[in-house]
Image (cartoon, rainbow, N blue to C red):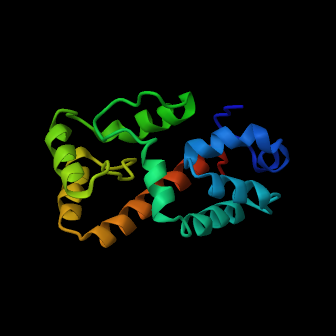
Amino acid sequence: MSPSSLTLAQFNTAPAADLEDPLRACAPIDRWTGAILAGRPYADVEQLRGTASALAGEWTAAEVRGALAHHPRIGERAQGLAAVEAAHSRAEQAGVEDPGAWVAANARYEGRFGTVFLIRAAGRSQAEMLAELERRLALDEEQERSERAEQLRQIALLRLEALVPA
């Protein structure tokens, strides 16, 4: 099942197996998707989002690292992702005006932190994202680890909002 969106009633009653892939497209962290599914039924969308946000706050550094393997670099086309996840990525990177500008920026970030640069791109311009990358290059490893987890949480919640809109 790869629904574009579901009502809360559909989300609450669908077989868990039908929701695993759509939830993994929000954040590919099995413990998170499993806990969201186990928490059903939700009284309202706010409860679902609040639960998802609280659970995301418990992600480990290893879970975030694993999830980063599913995120293309900013400025690159999503390849090898499930259709739903690739569609999310394309829509979220709409603010990327010049993918070539990201080659050197991504290389500097990866050289500093050893992983892809992750940012909630939705609603941000290329200039804003590049400025944020520059700001984050000055962070220490622990600060940046926290920043990456927060960006992944924001991405996951935006995707969940698209899956189960209010």
Q: In front here: 61 or 42?
A: 61
44 up-or-down from 162: above or below? below
Q: In front here: 129 or 115?
A: 115
6 up-or-down from 109: above or below? above
Where is residue 7? Give x, y as percent: 75, 45
Where is residue 78? Give x, y as percent: 40, 31
Residue at (48% x, 49% y) in the render: 67
**Residue 4 horizontal side relative to residue 91, left or right:** right
Query: Which quadrant, please, contains the N terminus?
Result: top right
Say how many tags the image has: 0
**Residue 101 horizontal side relative to residue 29, left or right:** left
Residue at (35% x, 51% y) in the render: 118
Residue at (67% x, 63% y) in the render: 46
Where is residue 36? Give x, y as percent: 71, 57
- Can residue 64 be seen in the rendering of this structure? yes
- Residue 93: which quarter of the image? top left
Q: In front here: 23 or 65?
A: 65
- Can residue 153 be seen in the rendering of this structure? no
**Residue 107 horizontal side relative to residue 22, left or right:** left
**Residue 95 horizontal side relative to residue 105, left or right:** right
149 up-or-down from 111: above or below? below
Residue at (42% x, 42% y) in the render: 71
- Residue 79: which quarter of the image? top left
